[in-house]
Amino acid sequence: MTNDNATKKTQTWMNYLTELFEEIKLNEGPCIVWEGGKTNKGYGRVCYKQKFYAPHRIMLEYAMDRQIGEGLNACHKCDNPSCIRPAHLWEGSQKQNVDDAIQKGRMGHNAEKLTQ
């Protein structure tokens, strides 16, 4: 890829990110809430060049200055699927994410705590 093509690609991506950030709601709480499109589970969802992306993954990758490792997830410390605050996100395996949910009582036999 030539420098001109790389520059155009970067500018296109930066323009898209500018539009993406318009969907962020800065609230008074600790989370930065994604107000754009969402999945039925509350996770943000955006489409760029006919491909869907999760805004919380984009924000974590931006904060880490690298892509999330292959087979890994962008997990939430705050347990708010709409949150995209990088400080609330961490890179982890599916097992680590499930273990985190169990430890917090959101999954397994402790999940009843959330409904009581």
Image (spheres, rainbow, N blue to C red):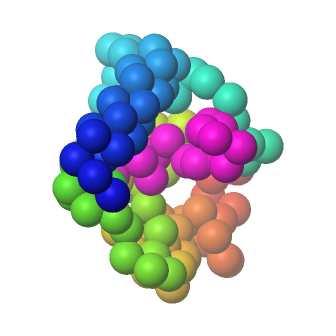
Residue 91: percent from left, percent from top = 35, 68
Name the residue: 20% across, 55% down.
65
Numbered range of the magenta stretch: 43-60
Marks counted in the figure total 0
As rendered, which of 49 and 58 lies closer to the eye?
Answer: 49
> Is residue 98 shown left or right of residue 74?
right
The N terminus is located in which quarter?
Answer: bottom left
Q: Is residue 64 visible?
A: yes
Above or below residue 101? Residue 15 is above
Find out whether residue 49 is within the magenta segment: yes
Name the residue: 63% across, 70% down.
107
Name the residue: 61% across, 58% down.
113
Find out whether residue 57 is within the magenta segment: yes
> Is residue 58 shown left or right of residue 36?
left
Using the rendered view, name the quadrant where residue 83 is placed. top left
Using the rendered view, name the quadrant where residue 90 is placed. bottom left
As rendered, which of 113 and 66 lies closer to the eye?
Answer: 66
As rendered, which of 51 and 75 lies closer to the eye?
Answer: 51
> Is residue 116 shown left or right of residue 69?
right
Q: Is residue 99 visible?
A: no
Residue 42: percent from left, percent from top = 67, 40
Residue 13: percent from left, percent from top = 41, 36
Residue 92: percent from left, percent from top = 39, 74
